[in-house]
Image: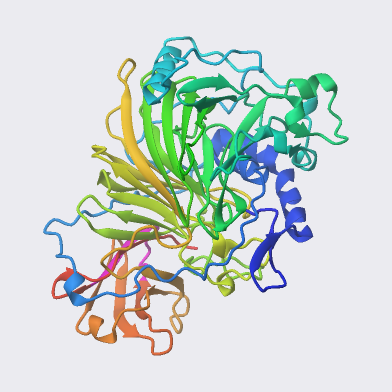
Amino acid sequence: MHLESALALDGAGAVRFSAFNGAVSRLRAAAGIVRRNMARAGQFGLAGFILALAACSGASEPAVEADPAPDAMDTISPEALPDMPEDPEVPIESTEADPAPTDEPEVTVVAAETEPTPEPSPMPVSEEQPAPVSSTAFGFEQAAEAARDLSKETFQEPATIPQAAANLNYDTYRRIQTTESAMAWGRDGEETRVLFDPRGYLFTHNVKINIVEDGEVKARPYSAEDFNFFDLPLPDEARENLGFSGFRLLAPINRSGKFDEVVSFKGASFFRALGAGNVFGASARGLSIGTASPDGEEFPFFREFWLVKPQPGDRSVRVYALMDSASVTGAFAFDITPGPMTRMDVDAVFFPRRELRTVGVAPVTSMYFFSPQDSRKQTGDYRPAVHDSEGLAIRMHNGEWVWRPLSNPQTLQVSVLAGQSPRGFGLMQRRRGFDDYSDMEAGYEYRPNVWIEPKGDWGAGQLTLVEIPTANEYNDNIVTFWRPREPWQVGEPERLSYSMTWSMTPPEISSVVAVAETRAGRSPGSEGRRYMFAIDYGTGVPASFLDGAEPFVTASQGRVLNPHLVRHRETGRTRLTFEFDPQGANVTEFRALVTKAGRPVTETWLYRWRPE
């Protein structure tokens, strides 16, 4: 999704981000469909809601001075090759039914059950008091106690915000500016700063803010003086009762002394972060419930935050959060370390109010519109690719590395890619050249990778990928998460921990060669009956490394023809090509990798093909 930014060069030749009218007009067009997307969220859950979140977040202006990220595999030696697992973990992709004559979206579900869920709803107005907590030595256990106590109460539907604030549109809401006096800290030489965001427009949740200093909790009340409303049509009463919608953390991650926006918590349980050189793209959530359910999705929301003021010299910031919804409450501890790779260590505990079968743990969402990896081509667009993320990377429980290119399907797709807790997974943006996208406004080459690493064994479950059809680039249509196998039960807390890395460069380097690019299309000379696939692997691998290597390509239906491995002399990349004869297949799952002496030397490539 677009930011209100475009690339520009300053006098010294450094790349900066500045306001650009073209980007603004595109965002205004996007804002025009936000409300339609919110209605669509009742069907597809997340697409419209995240659009509003992204469009209205505070603009970040990083000084992007880093070179484009190198390929995931810079160098590799034969000694670094892993043994082929004796029992390789085979990702299981779901299959799809033919379109049914119904108004409901086609949902491809693997061992999933649906839950009726409400649409996101606003938070109570600001006179509600914060959850009772100890005034000293506040920590995660105190936040968890607040969540446990809240789960025993009947869920209260949030109240609405002043109508005048709800009537603000995209342009008018963006005009509200945070004043310098509203900083939680940052005036005394701290390494970070915190700014608050007001409610308004589509952001109706009233968020309580507390500051924890030396173990003591102090409520940070909302004040209209924290914001400059200019001449907006907001009565004084509305301004005085807006309340907070979230906050932003700033730190100098691109240039010393320049505080860039690094993390934003705003809207339901959504949050986003940046590494050096990034602009906002993919998002994360505290928890998902009922994602891809035809009955819609429930959106838990953060209702209270405790921001721990860092000690002098601290480079990390700890944030505690209280989450609420009709079905579950939860508490979070976020340890945020801004930097070239911004890291977030997350501890969470959940208290179900009812049995939950379709929760999504550590959900990450993004946008994929089109690219050369699609067999069904996008026509009428001058750009070669449009996406915030291009693939799902997985390090399986047994150590196998997997790459699954994303798609913009014609019908809703749900894929299960692992049955055991993975060592890591995330949505990646691997292509980092301007020519890969040719969009001077969007800056897709600067969108962050988001990598999740579970801490401990999450047990049995399903690593799930949801791909939602979209007709444009303004909808987030991709989500991946871990779904536990066992339902969550009332009275049984669920604890888990994981880390998140947001970055331009690959957050983790595998010991095998990564897939750099996928291309798909009709096979020349086949009169349209066959398809051709080309898988390019990363540069930096010695030519002798792949001598004697063998390609393996399988298809669940149809026939694979002429698999061939060749090295390109100019680019240094190695390419695996093959043809495919569908033989009447309606859907086919491909699996490809390159081995040497019986051991894998590349990632396992997965791809779902459907007729155009």
Where residue 246 sits in the image (x, y, percent)?
A: 61, 33
Query: Which residue in the rendered view is the most extreme toward the bottom?
Result: 569
Q: Is residue 259 left or right of residue 140?
A: right
Residue 583: say if magenta: yes
Closer to the camera in the image, 144 or 300: 144
Q: Is residue 454 left or right of residue 385?
A: left
Where residue 547 sits in the image (x, y, percent)?
A: 22, 85
Q: Is residue 547 above or below residue 314?
A: below
Closer to the camera in the image, 562 or 75: 75
Q: What number of labels is visible? A: 0
Q: Is residue 473 above or below residue 32?
A: below
Which stretch is magenta?
581-594
The residue at the point 66 percent across, 71 percent down is 382
- Whether residue 102 can be seen here: no
Quarter where residue 491 is shown: top left
The residue at the point 46 percent across, 29 percent down is 320
Quarter where residue 166 is shown: top right
Where residue 486 sits in the image (x, y, percent)?
A: 27, 29
- Whether residue 56 can be seen here: yes
Closer to the camera in the image, 295 or 426: 426
The residue at the point 84 percent across, 22 percent down is 236
Closer to the camera in the image, 104 or 388: 388
Residue 532: say if magenta: no
Query: Which residue in the rendered view is the most extreme toward the top?
Result: 153
Where residue 587 sits in the image (x, y, percent)?
A: 38, 57
Q: How is the image coloured?
A: rainbow
The residue at the point 45 percent across, 72 percent down is 519
